[in-house]
Image (tube, grey):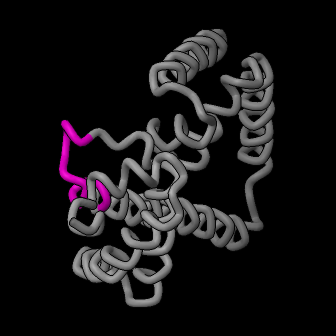
Amino acid sequence: MPSDILDTDEVLLARVAQGDRDAFARLFAGYARKVKSYLIKLGAPGAIAEDLAQDAMVSVWRRAASYDPLKAKASTWIFVVARNAWIDRLRRERVELAYRDTLISGEESDDEAPDEAAMRGQTEEQMATALAKLSPEQRQVVQLSFFEDRAHSEIAERLALPLGTVKSRLRLALMKLRAHWEQYS
């Protein structure tokens, strides 16, 4: 009996987790178009859906070892990876738009009152001081979570840390920041 018949998507994912490029090529051929169609149904424009489908399939390659066949079918897992890529894209766009709005409104308000400018400068200085009191690891997690609006799971994946470590670092950083800000209340 040919091995192609026995190679379910779950078996292919297990082989991908071991670095099998042929298994990945077969998964890619079977899912890339389906993933793109799914992303379009979620609201992604065609070109963006194409890019996201590529990104999702690269994530499948990288994260295949984290797939657990006891929790979900391979197809479900692949579509969740794709959906998460779309959600991450939307979050990044939201942060970029907020940043642009801040720049635009900052440009429009060149006539900032002197007392407002002094207050803003003081607040920025206090913020920099507070952030400087954090460990580099805590500062990095705060930066990714609050300034880049990344999800805890994405931070964990990006920094190759357990999710619990990311949450602990963030919780400790927030406690330190809260203590710092309470002295100004």
Residue 179 placement (x, y as % from top left): 60, 9
Q: Quadrant of the C terminus?
A: top right
Which residue appears at 71% of the width and 46% of the height?
116
Q: Is residue 95 left or right of residue 91?
A: right
The magenta segment: 69-78
Kindly identify the residue that appears in the image at 38 percent across and 86 percent down.
45
Give the answer, above or below, for where 184 lies relative to 81. Answer: above
Residue 158 quadrant: top right
- Is 6 or 98 nearer to us in this picture? 6
Q: Percent from the top left, x then y, of residue 90?
A: 42, 65
Q: For residue 178: magenta?
A: no
| Residue 34 or residue 93, whichever sits in front | 34
> How far from the left and from the top, in percent, is residue 99?
61, 62
- Name the residue at 42% across, 52% down: 15
Asked whether residue 117 appears in the rendered view, the answer is yes
Above or below, comparing residue 133 to residue 109 in the picture: above
**Res 40 quadrant in image:** bottom left
- The reply to whether the magenta stretch includes residue 71 is yes
